[in-house]
Amino acid sequence: MPKVRQFTIAAKLLIWASALIIIFFGTTAYLFRQVSHDAEVSNRIVAENHALDSAIQRMLERLYSVQDNISRYRLLGGDEKAVGFIVEDLTRFGEILEDTLDKHPRYREEWKELTAEYEITLDPGETVGDNLAPNVTVREWTDILEQSLLDNVADMEQSLTELHDAGQRAADIGLYGLIACLVLGVGGSLGLAWTLNRSLSEVQRGIRELGTGATPRDIRILSNDELGELALAFNAMAARLRREERMRSDFVAMLSHEIRTPLTSVRESVDLIKSGTFGQVTEQQAKFLHIAESEAIRLSELLARLMSVSRMESETLELKPAETDAGRLIEFTLERLAPTAEAKSVTLKAEVPDTPVVFTADREHIRQVLLNLAGNAIKFSPEGGTVTVSAASGGDTVTFRVEDDGPGIPEEERERVFLKYYREPAMRDSVDGAGLGLAISKRIILAHQGRIWVEGEPGRGSRFCFSLPVKHA
């Protein structure tokens, strides 16, 4: 048997799970990296930009205070307190400057003038405007620090903008990753489920048809995995069963043909001997001749059933629909089976509505179904039992029922009784039969687009039912 497997189910699941894991962990890794980067930027803003901003602000406050005290000193004509304040502010300014440069050494070159030797003139000017004018050194320092403050603010704004943009990108990537995971997870699982269910449905259909006893048909191979191999194996099995069925049908046809002629000769010979053509027949001889005649008739009926099954399987069942009265069919059936029922002391009853139940069907075939079902009911009923045949109309269907007082059929055996050559295990040794009557009946009912089933409980009899459409299509 050729192989069709390219991707196993496990490989498909692995590919699907791997893609899902890659997207999930890739998105998670990116988000983790972005969060780490954002944390670094935030830490830099707090540790550098904010701290530097605070330090520059404090140094500017000191320089503004120095300028105010210089102006005060000039206006008051030499206030010693103002000089003390100037010295204190410059000292504190120097401490803050050194501490800031230690933490931010990159500003040493830019603030080189702040750390160089400087000179502050306290002499008063000729006018009030001169006295209020800023000191040159202090003004240069203030300009340097204010420019550094502006640069630091701009740097902070740029970092915050980058942080915002990075956060927006992270949010977008996270959303896209989540959508991709959902699409791949849900879509992939639905796709795999659909693919597997599609292949399994084909195999299930084939097995279900095989279980009904119908000729097995090939099923479609819809995948290239283990289920595809299973479908291929099923098709190989179905082909083998079809070959065996053809061989069996050919054998049955050949056997029936070869046996029919000698069997006819045997029956004619028995009839001639019984009629006394070759001399007087004794009572004992007549007894054995009657047994031989009965067995010959039984073999003829068996051959007829075998031929009927073979004919139904080899060609489409031809139906000749016509208006049929259910009451007349039941009446004919009971008349035909009356001698058999009388021999076994079985009572036959008919239950038909007062209003005629008329439907369209092939009269001869439905009559054969009733004969098969009622004959089985008589066969399995105990002596003194009752077999009831009834018909009822319900809407667009007519339903027939054949009920007996026999041993009943276990629930697990009810579907199998309609298979060819099948006989209920408990009855194989006690009741004669080839297991063909119900198979023939089912084929006829299905050809009429009807349904046949069995009801009842073990030990409380069986009720075989079949329903037919009132109007045959």
Image (tube, grey):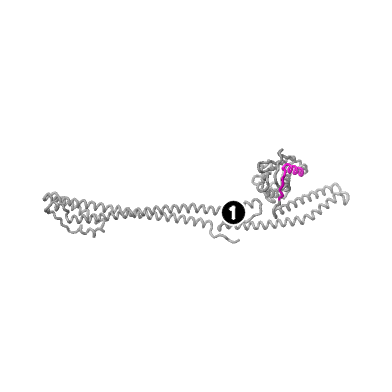
**Residue 466 visible, this orientation:** no
- Seen at 51% across and 57% down, the residue is 12
- Asked if residue 336 lies left or right of residue 177, the reply is right
Question: Picture coordinates of residue 341 (x, y %)?
Answer: 76, 42
- Label 1 sits on what residue type? Glu
Question: Picture coordinates of residue 35 (x, y %)?
Answer: 37, 53
Q: Secondary structure at mark 1?
A: helix
* Label 1: few (<14), some (14–19) or many (≥20) C-alpha neighbours in 10 Å: some
Magenta region's main secondary structure?
Answer: helix
Magenta residues, start to end: 319-337
Question: Picture coordinates of residue 24 (x, y %)?
Answer: 44, 54
Judging depth in this view, the residue of 10 and 470 nearest the camera is 470
- Residue matched to label 1: 202
Question: Picture coordinates of residue 394 (x, y %)?
Answer: 66, 41
143 in magenta = no
- Asked if residue 127 lies left or right of residue 265, the reply is left
Q: Looking at the image, which residue sits at the far right?
A: 279
**Residue 307 visible, this orientation:** yes
Question: Could you tell me which quadrant the N terminus lies in?
Answer: bottom right
- Asked if residue 140 lies left or right of residue 305, the reply is left
Judging depth in this view, the residue of 419 and 114 nearest the camera is 114
Judging depth in this view, the residue of 286 and 156 nearest the camera is 156
- Seen at 23% across and 51% down, the residue is 58
324 in magenta = yes
